[in-house]
Image (spheres, rainbow, N blue to C red):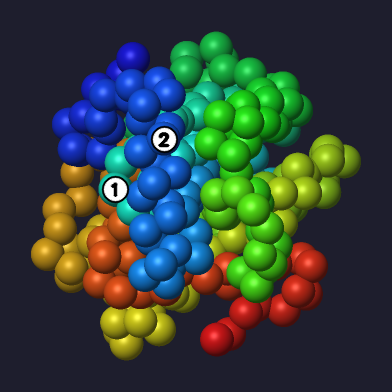
Amino acid sequence: MATKKLAKELGLLRQHNGKKKQEMDTQHSRSEKEKGQFFDYLIVIDFESTCWEDKGKAHLCQEIIEFPAVFLNLVTGDIIEQFHTYIQPREHPKLSDFCQKLTGISQDQVDEGIPLPTCLGLFKQWLKNLVQKYHLVFHSNYTSSTNGCHCTFGTWTSWDLGVCLHSECKRKQLNKPAVLNSWIDLKITYRKFYSRTPNGLRGAIEDLGLCFEGREHSGIVDSMNTAKLAFKMAQDGCYLNITHSDTLKHPVTD
Ligand code: AMP
Ligand code: MG
Ligand code: MG
């Protein structure tokens, strides 16, 4: 699978040995909790959407065309599972040249993709399987203490879940999975922890002495690099907390 090959090249994917590996993950989770990091796992998402050179147009009608999610073990830094689909845009089925150049996504890839409602159904099923396999508990805030491995979503900026998916679901009257109402905005977290504003995701990664690997603005590549960044931040002692939650109504500021 192309994405697995890419993850291996990025050094993020290890051979997964069924139950044995799961037991190891749980052990790691316990030791991480002792050190104080609340979340054991992070699901990193980075959507690509339709876009045009004229940014005014984008504001009204962007549609997701690539939906990737990578499941990161925050203790080992391994990406152990992933979800990845291309999506057919319905409002503007023809991708602009600008969009194809920016994202590297071709017209054929989206034509052969799936509709967003189907994608959301498959994504929910993927999450359900993860919950069972890794005994996950999702959180809308970081103070809940429930038995199980703690998991939430991570994104570079809040655009993906707070703007892009939110407004497309609202516009098309689709049910946005409730679990996607809380997330860690890694850019906010980064700025606060390192006390500087990075120049985009690539800049943030390079400022920490890491390399951005692969093609920027490919959703799956951006997700993997964001996961690598999140792991580095955790290793540097940055405590990863939920920054946005519908339940909390306001961004968590501390
Ligand atoms: P990114 O995750 O940075 O690749 O961006 C996500 C989406 O934002 C892209 O798929 C585009 O729809 C839009 N976008 C990003 N950069 C630009 C840009 N320079 N001009 C117009 N749209 C952009
Ligand atoms: Mg992005
Ligand atoms: Mg991207």
Instruction: Looking at this view, name the residue that lies furthest to the left.
Output: 209
Location of the N terminus by quadrant is top left
Along the viewing direction, whichever of 157 and 108 lies nearer the viewer: 157
Give the quarter of the image for residue 106.
Answer: top left
Question: On the rendered structure, is 44 left or right of 169?
Answer: left
Q: Amino acid at mark 2?
A: Glu
Q: Position of residue 156 (x, y in %)?
A: 44, 60
Amino acid type of the residue tagged 1 in the rendering: Thr
Measured Cα–Cα span from mark 1 to mark 2:
13 Å
From the viewer's perspective, is residue 66 above or below residue 36?
above
Q: Write the residue at 50% across / 46% down.
A: 43
Residue 23 - label: 2
Quick one: 27 or 191, which is closer to the camera? 27
Q: Nearer the viewer, residue 166 or 26?
A: 26
Q: Quadrant of residue 210?
A: bottom left
Asked if residue 19 can be seen in this view, the reply is yes
Q: Position of residue 93 (x, y in %)?
A: 63, 25
Pointer 1 residue: 76
Tag 1 near tag 2, CB within 8 Å: no
Residue 67's x, y, as percent? 54, 34
Quadrant of the rendering where the C terminus is positioned: bottom right
Q: Is residue 110 above or below residue 205?
A: above
User: How packed is label 2: few (under 14 Cα within 10 Å), some, or many (20 or more)?
Assistant: few
User: Is residue 121 found left or right of 130 in the rendered image?
Assistant: right
Q: Please identify, in this view, whether the residue under mark 1 or under mark 2 is nearer the observer.
A: 2
First-in-chain label (1 vs 2): 2
Residue drawn 49% across the image and 35% down it: 68
